[in-house]
Amino acid sequence: MKKATANDGTAPRDGSADDDNALARRACEGDRAAFEQIMRRHNRRLYRLARATLRDDAEAEDALQEAYLAAYRALGRFRGDAALSTWLVRLVLNECFTRRRRAARRNHVALMISSTDEDGTEQDIMDTANVASPDDAFARAELRALIERKLDALPEAFRIVFVLRCVEELSVEETAQCLGIPEATVRSRHFRARSLLRESLAQDIDLAERDLFSFGGEHCDRTVAGVLARLDDAH
């Protein structure tokens, strides 16, 4: 496994708990640079989780920013009983689930107000979604996009476990702690998710699974800048 750096959006695996706790203490004392380092360290993992949950790039970025703002406000209550990464995962999932519930309520109200355009509107959305296709000149990008679509189609419980276990390479124990479920459930959901994906992709899944929902430097910088700007506005 490659060693992560502080700025590539990947949380380091060696000694990260102690480093994270130290950064959290500094950020709690008002050290904005420490909080920025926390964001850059965990950006990619948390974005991938938000993206897998919400199935929309822009919505995932917005949810990530809101989760970071919630984390910043709540740092004083972080005691280090669980890893900072686990705490952040839970905040991101809470924000994603809140957005899902809010969207479901809005959709329900919209359907109650007007049902005449329901079928046509839904078909338009489906048709638009099916127009986009990866550039044929980049076979790996095309395969990655295919896997992302297949992953989006999985039931949410399988999808989230797959991202944490297969994409982010968390252990069964870490995944169980993040999601608050038994380790046996993590194993069964992970196995089922892989089985469903392999039914469609066969051997090709192993070629692209670690590139799913990439979160490059531009996205990372935009998320960090957005959070820091909003923190400035709040003061």
Image (spheres, rainbow, N blue to C red):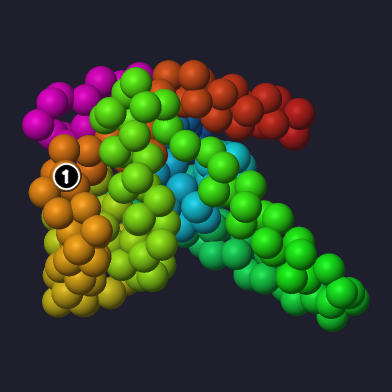
Residue 69 shows in the view: no
Kindly identify which residue carries mark 1.
204
Which residue appears at 17% of the width and 74% of the height? 188
The quadrant of the rendering that contains the C terminus is top right
Would residue 205 appear left or right of 120 to someone viewing this image? Answer: left
Q: In this picture, which residue range is highlighted in magenta?
A: 1-15
The prevailing secondary structure element of the residues shown in magenta is loop
Q: Position of residue 21 (x, y in %)?
A: 31, 40
Q: Position of residue 206 (x, y in %)?
A: 14, 44
Would residue 15 appear left or right of 67 to someone viewing this image? Answer: left
Q: Is residue 224 above or below residue 146?
A: above
Which residue appears at 47% of the width and 37% of the height? 133
The quadrant of the rendering that contains the N terminus is top left
Q: Position of residue 113 (x, y in %)?
A: 90, 76
Q: Is residue 96 above or below residue 57?
A: below
Q: Position of residue 68 (x, y in %)?
A: 53, 42
Q: How many marks?
A: 1
Q: Is residue 77 above or below residue 69?
A: below
Which residue appears at 21% of the width and 53% of the height? 201
SS at mark 1? helix
Q: Amino acid at mark 1?
A: Asp
Label 1 environment density (alpha carbons within 10 Å; few <14, some 14–19, many ≥20): some
